[in-house]
Amino acid sequence: MKAVVAIVALLVLADVAFAGTLVAHRASSTAPVAQKTTAHPCNHGFYVSQAAHAKKHGQGNSDVARSKLGKDGNCSSKAPGS
């Protein structure tokens, strides 16, 4: 009889420890996440994307893609189509 009580007590302790681990894990996974910045990267792809989204299809997109806009890290030039 003492053996059964000891086994049940160990199982209850193991269950409580496991539940505590789950609660601790859940609390750490719901921590606030740093928000991403919404600023665009200053690169050539930004200008090509802006040209594509301007809905002015054709030679304009190709010209922007072959240009040097944004390749020097300078995004002070006006985006095409805006």
Image: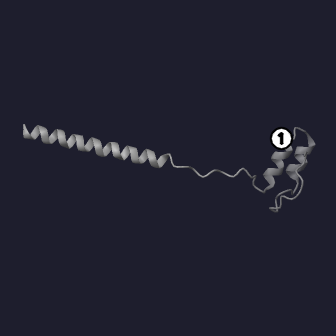
Q: Is residue 76 above or below residue 10?
A: below
Q: Quadrant of residue 8?
A: top left
Q: Nearer the viewer, residue 58 or 54?
A: 54
Tell me residue 18's x, y (percent).
32, 44
SS category of the residue bearing label 1: helix
Q: Quadrant of residue 14?
A: top left
**57 left or right of 6 in image:** right
Q: Which residue is mark 1?
A: 53
The quarter of the image holding the N terminus is top left
Q: Is residue 72 above or below residue 3?
A: below
Label 1 environment density (alpha carbons within 10 Å; few <14, some 14–19, many ≥20) = some
Identity of the amino acid at label 1?
His
Q: Residue furthest right?
A: 59
Tell me residue 70's x, y (percent).
83, 57
Tell me residue 29's x, y (percent).
48, 47
Query: What residue lies at 87% left-to-right and 52% top-to-bottom?
Result: 66
The colour mode here is: one colour
Query: What residue lies at 72% left-to-right and 50% top-to-bottom?
Result: 38
